[in-house]
Image: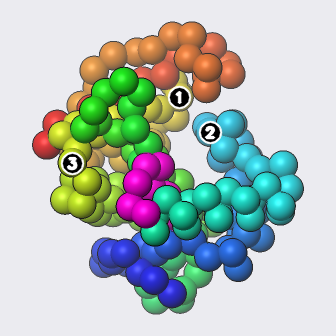
């Protein structure tokens, strides 16, 4: 396994093809489908294609930069995290993270976001990190705020907002 960085409870690493079943299953969880509806995979083959793409991007050190998250003490894969460029904005990225339901509410997302924010700004030429959260996802709002992200605006009519309730945009300048 190629680990990229660690936190107190987590190891963050490059995805492997063996992770396909987990990633597919995790992205079918109701919470994931509710808050990140465009992040579900149609089948294992699509999941494997996505993993191959993620591996290639990490190997070439370019965006999107998506990593697997596992528990340090058990090696269990519990989530993923990544960043992608903000269209038309150099040195700015949108950060994302997800922890499976079984392990949510334990502080792992907060720990993960802190470490991923630090890693990305140290290894890429990034000045500004954004977090976009679907209106109503209070748990993710708390994670962003605990990590120093500040609310900047509400975005209505976003393509990835299937409910039409708006996206809350948070920002952290480095």
Instruction: Give how far apart the Cα atoms at labels 1 and 2 are.
Output: 8 Å
* Residue 40 higher or lower than 118, as above or below: above
**Mark number displayed over residue 36:** 2
Residue at image x 54%, y 64%? 56
Q: Which residues are magenta?
A: 60-68
The earlier-in-sequence mark between 3 and 2 is: 2
Nearest to the eye among marks 1 and 3: give it.
3
Label 3: how many Cα within 10 Å (few below 14, some 14–19, many 20+) = few
Quickly name the residue at label 3. Answer: 125
Instruction: Answer whether residue 155 is visible to the viewer in this image.
Output: yes
Residue at image x 49%, y 22%? 167
- Give SS at disc 3: loop
* Residue 28 higher or lower than 164, as above or below: below
**Mark number displayed over residue 65:** none
**Mark number displayed over residue 134:** 1
Question: Which quarter of the picture shows residue 145?
Answer: top left
Extreme residue toward the left, this view:
174
Residue at image x 52%, y 34%? 137
Whether the magenta-drawn stretch holds residue 61 is answered as yes
Instruction: Answer whether residue 172 is visible to the viewer in this image.
Output: no
Give percent across and percent down for residue 14: 50, 72
């Amino acid at each position: 396994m190629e680990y990229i960085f660690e936190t107190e409870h987590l190891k963050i690493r490059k995805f492997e093809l063996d992770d396909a079943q987990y990633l597919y299953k995790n992205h079918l969880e109701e919470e994931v489908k509710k808050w990140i509806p465009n992040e579900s995979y149609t089948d294992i083959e699509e999941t494997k294609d996505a993993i191959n793409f993620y591996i290639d991007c990490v190997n070439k050190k370019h965006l999107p930069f998506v990593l697997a998250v596992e528990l340090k003490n058990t090696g269990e894969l519990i989530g993923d995290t990544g960043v992608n460029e903000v269209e038309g904005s150099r040195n700015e990225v949108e950060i994302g993270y997800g922890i499976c339901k079984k392990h949510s509410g334990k502080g792992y997302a907060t720990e993960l976001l802190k470490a991923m924010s630090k890693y990305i700004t140290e290894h890429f030429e990034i000045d500004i990190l954004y977090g976009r959260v679907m209106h109503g996802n209070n748990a993710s709002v708390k994670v962003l705020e605990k990590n120093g992200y500040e609310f900047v605006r509400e975005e209505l009519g976003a393509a990835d907002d299937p409910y039409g309730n708006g996206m809350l945009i948070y920002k952290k300048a480095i």
